Image (tube, rainbow, N blue to C red):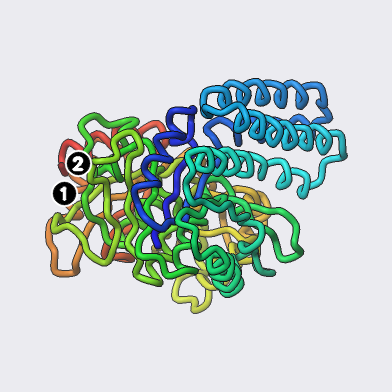
Amino acid sequence: MKVLKFGGTSLGDAQRMRNVADIVCQQGKVLVVLSAVAGTTDSLVRVVDAVKHGELAKARNIVEVLQNHYQRYIDNLYRLETSKSEARDFVEAQLADISDVAQQRYVPALEFHILAKGELISTELFSLLLREQEKSASLLSALDFLRLNQDSAPDEDYLSEQLSAQISNHSNTDIFVTQGFICRNAFGEICNLKRGGSDYSASLFAAAIDSEEVQIWTDIDGMHNNDPRYVDGTKPIRELSFDEAAELAYFGAKILHPSSIKPTRKKNIPVKLLNTLEPSASGTVISTKSAQARIKAVAAKDGITAIKIRSSEMLQAPGFLRKVFEVFELYHTSIDMITTSEVAVSVTIDDTSYLESIVKTLTEFGQVEVDKNLSIVCVVGEFLVESSGIASQVIRSLEDIPIRMISYGGSSHNISLLVSEEHKVNALNALHQRLF
C-alpha cells in the first residue's frame, strides 16, 4: 500500500480536488492523507484569534465567509444533487459547531477543536466525491488512531496497532482517506501536530503500516536546489538522501515538514515529492540513494536569534558548556547553530518564547548579547572529510555579504552560515550563481 498526501493548494478549488481524485484512482491500494482546503486553516486561526479577544461578531463574520466559500466549492465539485445536499449538510454542521464553540470562553482545547474542522471538512468532501464516482473508498478518522503520549510525541505503537486494524476491517477497500495534522493528546482531547504537520502524519502512517512508499503532492515539481520565491532558474533535485532532505526541510525548504523524514528513514520507506499540476513530472525521490553532485541545494531559515555568552570563566573550565546547554533544556528551546572560542560561546535559536528567561538565567554565567532578525543559510550536499575546496567555494560566494557565524564539520551534509535577514535574498542568489 502507498501513502499519498495532498496539501491545501492541491485541493484549492473543485477542479483541483477532482484532479486529486484522478491521481488517487490510478495508484491501486492507497491511504490518502489530506490537509485542509487552501485558506481554511488561516480563516480558522483568525476565528480563534477573534475568540481570544472577545470579538464574537468578527468570528461569526469569518465563519459566514467560509460558509459562502464552501457553498461555491460544493456547487462546482459534484454532479449529483444528492451529493451536493449531503456535502452542504456536513459543512453547515461543522461551521455551526464552530459558531457555537466560539461563544465559549477561550481555552487551548477550544483552539484545537476549531482548527481540526479544516481537515474534517476536506476529507468528508473528498470521500463523498469518490463515492459519487463509485470508487471503493472508506473514510477513516485520524482521531481514532493518531494520539500523542505524555511527552507530546506520537504514540507509534498505538498508531500501528489501531491503523492496521482499521485497514484490515475494510479488506475490500482500495482507497482509504484520512486527515493529516489532527490527532488526540494523551488525555484523549483533540490536538494537532502544528502547522505543516500533514506531511508528518503521512510519514507516521506509512511507517505504521510498512507502506511501500510515501508521495507528498504539492504545487511544485519536487524540492528545488534553491528557493524559487527568491531565486530565478532553480531546478528540481531528482534524488536526495534522507539526511540531505532532513537538513533542507529543517533549514527552510518549505515543500517538506522538518519532522516528516524521521519515521520513513527508520523504516527505509522512499518519499516522493510530486506536483499535482504536472503529475507526469519526475519530482524528487528521497531514499538511501543520492545523486553524485557534491553540492545539492541551498535553503534559508528566517526568524533566527543569536545569543552570545562571554565569560573568562570558560577558559579551561570543564562543565561550562554543559551548564549553558542545561539552560536551553530547562526552557525547552532547541539550538540550531553553535560556535565557541576560548572565552565565548554563540548559539542560535528559532523559538523565542522563553528568550527573556533564558537571557536572565545565562547572565549568571557571564555577559550576554542578543542579536535578532537573522537568517541561517544552509548549503546541503555530500561533504566528505576528504573533500577539499567546498567550504572555501561557499565562503567566496558570499564575499560581499557579512557573515555572523559559520558551522561546518558537525554534519557531512551541511554548511550553515548566519546572516542578517536583510542579506538573505542576496546570499541565496550569490550562492546560486557561484555553486550551480
Kindly state the secondary structure of the residue where label 1 is placed.
Answer: helix
- For the N terminus, give its image quadrant: bottom left
Q: On the picture, is 102 further left or further right than 378? A: right
Q: Which mark is residue 397?
A: 2
Pointers 1 and 2 in contact (C-beta within 8 Å):
yes
Residue at point 56% right, 45% down? 195
**Residue furthest bottom in the image:** 318
Kindly state the secondary structure of the residue where label 2 is placed.
Answer: helix
Q: Position of residue 74 (x, y in %)?
A: 58, 27
Residue 407 occupies quadrant: bottom left
Kind of residue at badge 2:
Ser
Residue at point 33% right, 33% down? 277
List the residue tagged with mark 1.
393
Q: Position of residue 395 (x, y in %)?
A: 22, 47
Residue at point 13% right, 58% down? 292
Q: Position of residue 244 (x, y in %)?
A: 30, 58
Q: Which mark is residue 312?
A: none
